[in-house]
Amino acid sequence: MANVLLVDDDQDLIEMNKTMLAQRGHTVLVAYSAAEALRVVQANPPDAAVLDAMMENPSAGLELARQLHGRMPKLPMIMLTGIREKMQFLAEPEETWLPVTKVLEKPVNPRVLADEVEKLLAAKEHAAGDGVHPEQIQPPRSRPQPRGPLRNPRRGQPK
């Protein structure tokens, strides 16, 4: 299947998510710090990455995301954070400041995380060669067709 990089300083969280992703057939690359992640990526480029926002310092995950994006601009990344609620911090993916595909709030159920990783991998595969970033792929939206003349709700008259 795919090489998935998990980066977090919480060994229990790594083990739970590693187990779930491995059960789904993925090869899981593990790092417990941003520096270790860069070494792992050098030896084994991942197909997707899951990063903790805060590791050896409060901005380690953000800095790692930027470095990985600089090396592999099309790498889909999920940022896990526990700081959104604690600090009322609303981080959304953004090309320069937070170049990740998705932000999820901790704690994340391992099945939910595995589902999200697989969605990103499917989007990446679909977009291969298109030059389209996975988060830009939107499902087609169908618009309901009107069923007659629009009526003014106050008068009951057609507009």
Image (cartoon, rainbow, N blue to C red):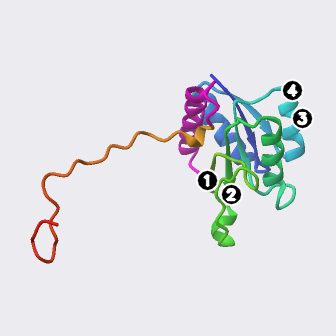
Q: Quadrant of residue 1?
A: top right
Asked whether 102 falls inside the magenta stretch, the response is no
Which residue is identified by label 1?
Answer: 104
- Crowding at label 3, few (<14), some or many (≥20) Cα neighbours within 10 Å? few
Tag shown at residue 14: none
Image location (x, y in percent) of residue 156: 9, 71
Could you tell which of marks 3 and 1 lies nearer the N-terminus?
3
At a point 63% along the width and 53% down the height, the residue shown is 103
Helix, strand or loop at mark 4: helix
The amino acid type, in three-letter code, at marker 3 is Arg
Answer whether labels 4 and 1 touch (C-beta < 8 Å).
Answer: no
Answer whether labels 3 and 1 touch (C-beta < 8 Å).
Answer: no
Answer whether labels 3 and 2 touch (C-beta < 8 Å).
Answer: no
Magenta stretch: helix, strand or loop mostly: helix
What is the C-alpha distance between the residues marked 3 and 2? 23 Å
Image: magenta residue range:
107-132
> Closer to the camera, 50 or 121?
121
Which residue is identified by label 3?
Answer: 39
Helix, strand or loop at mark 1: strand
Which residue is identified by label 2?
Answer: 81
Q: Quadrant of the C terminus?
A: bottom left
Could you tell which of marks 2 and 1 lies nearer the N-terminus?
2
What is the C-alpha distance between the residues marked 2 and 1? 6 Å
Residue 122 located left or right of residue 41: left
